[in-house]
Image (cartoon, rainbow, N blue to C red):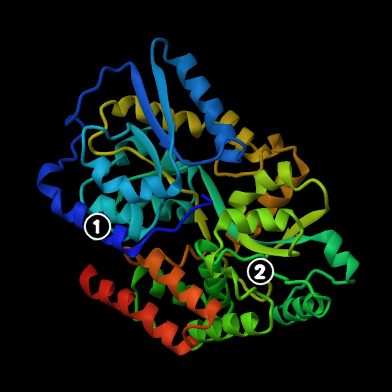
């Protein structure tokens, strides 16, 4: 979850590998037969994260309920799976079940290429389709174009996530700053920190955090129809319209005013998080995937969270998906494992460990911090405020947005030029999607 950068060359190679290997790739459930005694599992969540804790318990329960079956777990980084997915999934070394990123450019692309198993029948039989709200199920279903929101089930999320503002309560109190409820108040707060020699925002410009802030700024000027146009291709998106223009100009302005360090373009997300934990900046704008970890690690100061001010839409969605590769050898075992991660006891553990469960028993969530996290998520969900992530619409778009945000940070391109750069691959993909 915390290391998400890859080169455009690698992305292009992955796409070529996908398209070039179709003849060798089937997809039927009976294509590969395993020994029924081993479940090969890949995921990239840290052992101390909420998901890591919950899934480790799920492994124990799986082995206890399947005598003679051993789970072979291989922890991969986010980038290892992203970079090697097409090659591995089209080989006999494919895992039986793995965590994979959701969205058109990720799970949608692989489903379109026939590399993932259609799990629709299992979703209905085991109740997964009923456990997930329509909003969460959006990222689990893909049509024949690889566009999310309808069609067959190619994955199952068992947690949710959203982007929020983490803040250092002690530093806010030191400078007599209140929690902002509008963007104007946020900018006033950041100016107060800057006047006192403090860089307000801890930033990871080399990976996903910068583009998520850029998207959050766009969302502050957007509505649900704009999100659906951008994410689901319902209507053409004007990248020089008010949403993206405001986002790029404001982001560049924040850099110019010192709210974002000009040297942060090369900083990775992990280093961003550690800097915030070390109290080098009072604000970190990032996802709920940090929450459980920070509860355990950020213990030398008081901290809290608030939703991005001035907005009713926030980057967020279901969590990443459990997918079953088309060439998995032990698919029934994979379905059984996914089912265990959806059980109330595992969902409750995930919730009490700092995650956002999708099928927990509310009265079993007793941790105060976890209750706060889940309450904010429920408030977003009730107002239909999840707006997915900016890199989803097109293959390799993640890298395009990283590069664009970096140029805004280091000043190598003006906002209008950056908007032109991010518009072209989006529109190129739109022309190729088909209707």
- Pointer 2 or 1: first along the chain: 1
Q: Position of residue 72 (x, y in %)?
A: 40, 24
Q: Is residue 52 left or right of residue 107?
A: right
Q: Which mark is residue 312?
A: none
Tell me how far mark 2 sits from mark 1, CA to CA.
36 Å
| As drawn, 63 above or below 300 | above
Q: Is residue 60 left or right of residue 372?
A: left
Q: Nearer the viewer, residue 321 or 299?
A: 299
Asked where in the image residue 105 lies, by quadrant, the reply is bottom left
| As drawn, 179 above or below 32 | below
* Foreground label between 2 and 1: 1
Determine the secondary structure under disc 1: helix
Q: Position of residue 4 (x, y in %)?
A: 46, 55
Asked where in the image residue 275 lies, by quadrant, the reply is bottom right
Q: Position of residue 435 (x, y in %)?
A: 22, 69
At 39% across and 46% down in the image, what residue appears?
A: 80
| As drawn, 40 above or below 77 | above
| As drawn, 194 above or below 58 | below
User: What residue sits right under mark 1 in the picture?
Assistant: 13
Q: Nearer the viewer, residue 124 or 376?
A: 376
Q: Is residue 221 left or right of residue 141?
A: right
Q: Which mark is residue 308?
A: 2
At 23% across and 35% down in the image, what residue appears?
A: 327
Q: Is residue 117 visible?
A: no
Determine the secondary structure under disc 2: loop
User: How many numbered dots are placed on residues in this image?
Assistant: 2
Q: Position of residue 333 (x, y in %)?
A: 35, 24
């Amino acid at each position: 979850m915390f290391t998400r950068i890859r080169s455009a060359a690698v992305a292009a190679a992955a796409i070529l590998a996908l398209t070039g290997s179709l003849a060798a790739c089937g997809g039927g459930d009976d294509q590969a037969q395993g020994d029924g005694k081993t479940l090969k599992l890949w995921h990239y969540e840290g052992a101390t994260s909420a998901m890591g804790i919950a899934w480790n318990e799920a492994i124990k329960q799986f082995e206890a309920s399947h005598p003679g079956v051993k789970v072979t777990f291989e922890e991969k980084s986010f980038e290892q799976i992203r970079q090697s997915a097409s090659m591995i999934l089209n080989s006999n070394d494919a895992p039986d079940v793995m965590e994979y990123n959701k969205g058109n450019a990720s799970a949608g692309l692989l489903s379109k290429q026939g590399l993932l198993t259609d799990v629709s029948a299992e979703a209905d039989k085991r109740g997964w389709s009923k456990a997930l709200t329509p909003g969460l199920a959006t990222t689990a279903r893909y049509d024949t174009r690889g566009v999310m929101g309808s069609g067959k089930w190619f994955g199952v999320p068992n947690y949710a996530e959203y982007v929020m503002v983490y803040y250092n309560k002690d530093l806010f109190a030191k400078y007599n700053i209140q929690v902002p409820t509008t963007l104007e108040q946020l900018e006033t707060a950041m100016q107060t920190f800057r006047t006192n020699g403090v860089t307000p925002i801890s930033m990871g410009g080399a990976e996903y955090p910068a583009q998520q802030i850029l998207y959050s700024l766009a969302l502050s000027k957007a509505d649900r129809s704009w999100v659906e146009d951008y994410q689901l291709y319902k209507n053409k998106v004007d990248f020089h319209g008010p949403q993206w223009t405001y986002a790029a100009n404001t982001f560049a302005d924040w850099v110019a005013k010192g709210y974002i360090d000009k040297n942060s373009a090369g900083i990775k997300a992990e280093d961003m998080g550690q800097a915030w934990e070390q109290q080098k900046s009072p604000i970190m704008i990032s996802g709920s995937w940090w929450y459980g970890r920070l509860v355990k690690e950020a213990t030398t100061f008081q901290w809290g969270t608030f939703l991005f001010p001035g907005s009713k839409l926030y980057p967020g969605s279901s969590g990443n998906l459990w997918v079953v590769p088309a060439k998995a050898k032990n698919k029934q075992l994979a379905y059984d494992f996914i089912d265990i991660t959806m059980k109330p006891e595992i969902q409750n553990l995930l919730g009490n460990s700092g995650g956002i469960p999708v099928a927990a028993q509310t009265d079993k969530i007793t941790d105060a911090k976890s209750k706060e996290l889940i309450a904010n998520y429920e408030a977003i969900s009730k107002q239909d405020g999840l707006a997915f992530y900016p890199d989803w619409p097109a293959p390799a778009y993640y890298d395009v947005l990283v590069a664009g945000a970096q140029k805004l940070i280091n000043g190598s391109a003006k906002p209008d030029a950056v908007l032109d750069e991010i518009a072209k691959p989006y529109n190129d993909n739109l022309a190729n999607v088909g209707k």
